[in-house]
Amino acid sequence: MDTVILQHISKSYVKEGPPALQDISFSVKKGELFGLIGPDGAGKSTIFRILTTLLLSDKGTATVAGYDVVQHYHEIRSCVGYMPGKFSLYQDLTIEENLHFFATLFGTTVEANYALIKDIYEQIAPFKNRRAGKLSGGMKQKLALCCALIHRPEVLFLDEPTTGVDAVSRKEFWEMLQRLKTEGITIVVSTPYMDEASLCERIALIQTGQILSIDTPANIIKDYPGKLYALRAPKVHQLLKDTRQYAGIRLCYAAGDKLHLSFKDEGKDHPAELLSWLESKGHQGVHIEEITPDIEDCFIAKTSTHE
Amino acid sequence: MSEKAIVCKDLTKRFGDFFAVNHISFDVDQGEIFGFLGANGAGKTTAMRMLCGLSYPTSGEATVAGYNVFRQQEAIKRNIGYMSQKFSLYESLTVRENIRFYGGVYGLSDKQLKEKGDELITKLGLEKEAKMMVGSLPLGWKQKLAFSVAIIHQPRIVFLDEPTGGVDPVTRRQFWDLIYDAAANGITVFVTTHYMDEAEYCNRISIMVDGRIDALDSPANLKKQFDAASMNEVFYALARTAKRSAD
């Protein structure tokens, strides 16, 4: 049986307006690294809070490690690790005290499971007598991960562990997750950074409480509707303004130092026509080529057709 | 009015024997979009606080909007705008109340407040939401509104501290359209971000490592200099050299 199963989960916080979650169903296999990918307000934290038995859903059922989230909440609490989006350790306790506290809470010792957290803990151990409230963002994140792992959970829930973290620390964090995966721990992780999606085995793209698609990152990219092109020219911002005026454009948006675009209907000789149209607008050195979309392109395509 | 929005020479902030900001020097042109990058703990926030007139430098010199960071902090505060991901608007005030409050703080007259408020609400398409609490708006709308409020008094410079964190990809791009509009109107934009694709949208970028500015140029030139295909690679190459482990 799958380790995490959600069936038709819905949740509203207010009577009026769209619900926080609308009919969410998905499952996560044992030992899988599963990503919930979506912006703030998508409903990611609500899913985590329901699965960790901190919040009741309005409709639907869910199980974690074979236990029902309502009937067997007690069993779930002892076999999952949860790292909330907001730093939730004791600010007045030191690194070491926090770790021992959480180990005791789960009826184990730091020594018993030290092997699991060794790689991560060693990076913060030089500061083990510093209070958690005085740590930098990256160190807090590593301590929170250690505390969530100290009872060797079957399932690890990580709610936006890399938000506000710089690109280098984000990369290191994902390397830590890959190592934990080899220990057989099932990991459900959320992120608003689309570039992190490719580091998961399977992902769910979510927006405003609805799942847009669930698959492997490779399959989601393969299912991109139509062709995607990259357009380059020296004056990128003006190029964006002008290209959006072109009649045959379906989507056109900035992507780093170039534009990404797709055409309304395919099969015609659009790229060449667009180039000569842009040249008539005074753009020089314009270059267009078909490219493989990334997850962010897929997300944009999904949300644009969605509206 | 000087041509430069920010002039900074050997600006330093020391806490005990720790150099949070270590002799940084750079200029920012009026109307420029300037990306201020660096790993967590590299010293970005400390540098920004000095430039916004919120913290005294230990040594060095800097002027912001023509005002001295040692002697004219209050004048700086009146001539800049500021927004961050963490604090932007009052959630329990309505859209219009927030505009009135911030406009008032920035010294706009009642007449200006009314005109600017209407203009801003129309521009952002928030007519229906004008009487709603800001807390009930989606994050992307909040951030667009916060940015517009931060420049309601036409400051010479606006400081944006990770303005797009957590915002969806479509809204993130709409936010940058607003940044370009502001820059086209002559407002200097000083922005930090962890999204490396956004670094490419800036005219020039500085990258801080261990309190120093280790690179400063246009994205194209930086990529050439580091022989990198993307700004992501440039950032890795530099941030990896960091010795101080604030993180």
Image (tube, coloured by chain):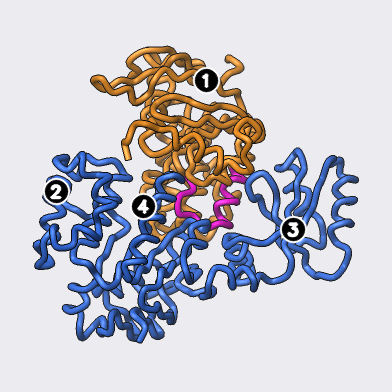
Q: Which residue is mark 4?
A: B91
Q: Is residue B23 visible?
A: yes
Say which colour chain B has: orange
Q: Which mark is residue A229?
A: 3
Residues at badges 4 and 2 in contact (C-beta under 8 Å)? Answer: no
Part of the protein shown in magenta: B163-178
3 or 4: mark nearer the eye: 3
- Residue A258 left/right relative to A142: right
Of all chains, the one bearing label 3 is A
Place residue A175 in its image quadrant.
bottom left
State how far apart marks 1 and 2 are (Cα). Answer: 42 Å
State the separation of the CA atoms marked 4 and 2: 37 Å
Q: Residue B107 occupies which quadrant of the picture?
A: top left
Query: Magenta stretch: residue B164 in it?
Result: yes
Say which residue label 2 marks.
A96
Is residue A120 toward the left or the right of residue B158 in the image? left
**N-term-proximal mark, 2 vs 3:** 2
In the image, which disc is placed on residue B26? Answer: 1
Label 1 or label 3, whichever lies nearer to me, is 3
Q: Residue at x 65, y 61 (%)?
A: A293
Instruction: Please tell me whether mark 4 sits on a helix, a strand or a loop.
Output: loop
Q: Secondary structure at mark 1?
A: strand
- x and y, in percent, of residue B65 in the image: 51, 20
Nearer to us of marks 4 and 2 is 2
